[in-house]
Image (cartoon, helix red, strand yellow):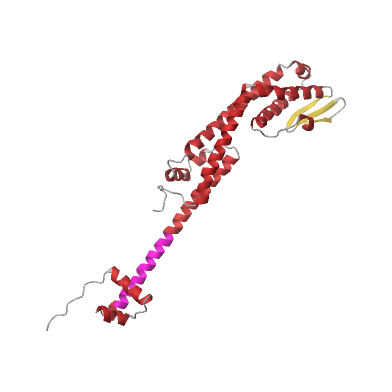
Amino acid sequence: MARRSRKPPVRPEMRRAWLKRYEEDGESPPQIAAADNFDVRTVRKQITLAREERERREARAAVLRNAMESHYRDICRFAEDLITKIAGDSTIPSTHKTNPLWSALKQHLPRSPLWKKLDRWDQALDELSVLDNNTQQHLREVLQAEPRLTEILAAGEEGVILGMVHALSLRMKNLAREWNGLEIDQNFKVEPAQESFVTVNYGSAHMGKVKEEHADIIRETLADFELEVTTWKEYEDMVRLFAEMKRLKVILHEELTIITLRRIVPGKCKYCPL
């Protein structure tokens, strides 16, 4: 009696074709078996196997898709946080630069102008901080030497100098940024304290309690210095720095907004799921 020849194993592409014929074309397992000369039990088994393989592929694809979406979402949220820092005129904290998402974003966008602009942003803020300190020191020296304030200093009203330094340095920064600042006619306040004494405030600048006759001297000196400080080199440097920061802020906001609104970051990083 001749031995029956054994059919070769069913190839993956064949069982996928059977699944398609069964699900989409409406062929029954017996019909497929008869048409392709296979045992109906084999056809049923292979259709089941093909369905299980498809489900595993779809499950893996779903897991990968969710992982990629989460990865992009993390990067976009990180970019949003950078936008917030820049909008608030803050330097980028060291904790951000050591965050794995900083590295991830840099690997995704290694040639982006973002990185040089972020470095320059921090440098400009550092320069501004140094300039502000130098300006306040200059103001203290000039005001302490101002003849009109000699009597006030002799009376021990030293809070006046601190308050004037604060007011004038803030005035310089507001003017350098083209912001509307305090107006001495509207914001210089004198209020009675005790007999022959008053308290003097100019916006957030507090000059403390002074003799009543000293209030006009303080007001006059402040008004004169508000004009004088705009001729100082420190003021010119502030104008330059604030103008540069304004340009940087526009560029950085645009670059980071593109990242957040695209929601998919081109390129790859070592944290990508694939």
Write down the quadrant of residue 149 in the picture: top right
- Vertical side of 51 occupied by 113: above or below: above
Spot the residue most to the left.
1
- Vertical side of 47 occupied by 151: above or below: above
Q: Is residue 210 left or right of residue 21?
A: right
Write down the quadrant of residue 249 in the picture: top right
* Main SS class of the magenta portion in the image: helix
Residue 251 horizontal/vertical position (percent): 53, 39
Residue 146 horizontal/vertical position (percent): 73, 17
Spot the residue most to the right.
195
Q: Residue at (43%, 49%) from the top-left corner?
A: 266
Q: Which residues are magenta?
A: 43-63
Q: Residue at (52%, 50%) from the top-left corner?
A: 261
In the picture, the quarter occupied by the N terminus is: bottom left
Q: Residue at (43%, 62%) from the top-left corner?
A: 62
Q: Count how many numbered circles sit on residues in the image.
A: 0
Q: Residue at (47%, 38%) from the top-left corner?
A: 115
Write down the quadrant of residue 185 in the picture: top right
Q: Is residue 129 left or right of residue 113?
A: right
Q: Would residue 50 be counted in the magenta stretch?
A: yes
Residue 230 horizontal/vertical position (percent): 67, 24
